[in-house]
Image (cartoon, rainbow, N blue to C red):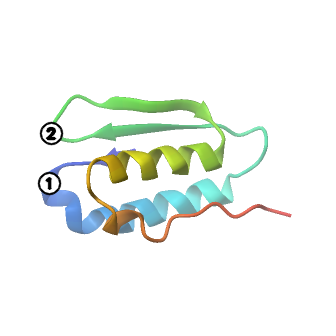
Amino acid sequence: MVDIKPHQKNMLAVELALAEGIIQKLNQPQNVFSVITFGVQTPNLLRQSVAADEAIASRVNFLTNNGDTEAISGLRVVDKP
């Protein structure tokens, strides 16, 4: 879930880093994730039942398309051995 309310902008990078950490910890072939934005508008399902790398990519694409490149500077998917 990504909170896109304007007053949350300072917390967005922290929230994304936390979400990324959770996704990395749960990154197993059988696990899937959904990406939802919420805030000033009705919640929006961006992606449903996707792998970890697709979940992070969809968040990055959403933020890039909405002009918030600062928040995505540290996002990545790390393959587990």
**Are discs 2 and 1 less than 8 Å apart at CB?**
yes
Tell me if mark 2 has few (under 14), some (14-19) or many (20+) residues whose alpha carbon lies within 10 angstroms of its own: few
Left or right side of 18 for 38: left
In x, y percent, where is residue 79?
A: 76, 61
| Disc 2 to disc 1, C-alpha distance | 8 Å
Task: Say the numbered circle drawn on residue 6.
Answer: 1
**The C terminus lies in quadrant:** bottom right
Mark 2 or mark 1, earlier in chain: 1
Q: Which residue is drawn at 18% across and 33% down?
A: 41
In x, y percent, where is residue 7?
A: 13, 58
Judged from the image, the secondary structure of the residue bearing numbered disc 1 is helix
Left or right side of 56 for 39: left
In x, y percent, where is residue 52?
A: 63, 47
Residue 54 versus residue 67 in the image, above or below:
above
**The N terminus lies in quadrant:** top left
| Quadrant hosting residue 37 | top left
Left or right side of 49 for 41: left
Residue 81 versus residue 41 in the image, above or below:
below
Tell me if mark 1 has few (under 14), some (14-19) or many (20+) residues whose alpha carbon lies within 10 angstroms of its own: few
Residue type at mark 2 is: Val
Task: Say the numbered circle drawn on residue 58.
Answer: none
| Quadrant hosting residue 21 | bottom right
Q: Residue at x 43, y 70 (%)?
A: 73
In x, y percent, where is residue 51?
A: 66, 41
Number of numbered discs on residues: 2
Q: Residue at x 28, y 59 (%)?
A: 68
Residue type at mark 1 is: Pro
- Give the residue number, with chain letter if any, for mark 2: 40
Residue 49 versus residue 52 in the image, above or below:
above
Judged from the image, the secondary structure of the residue bearing numbered disc 2 is loop
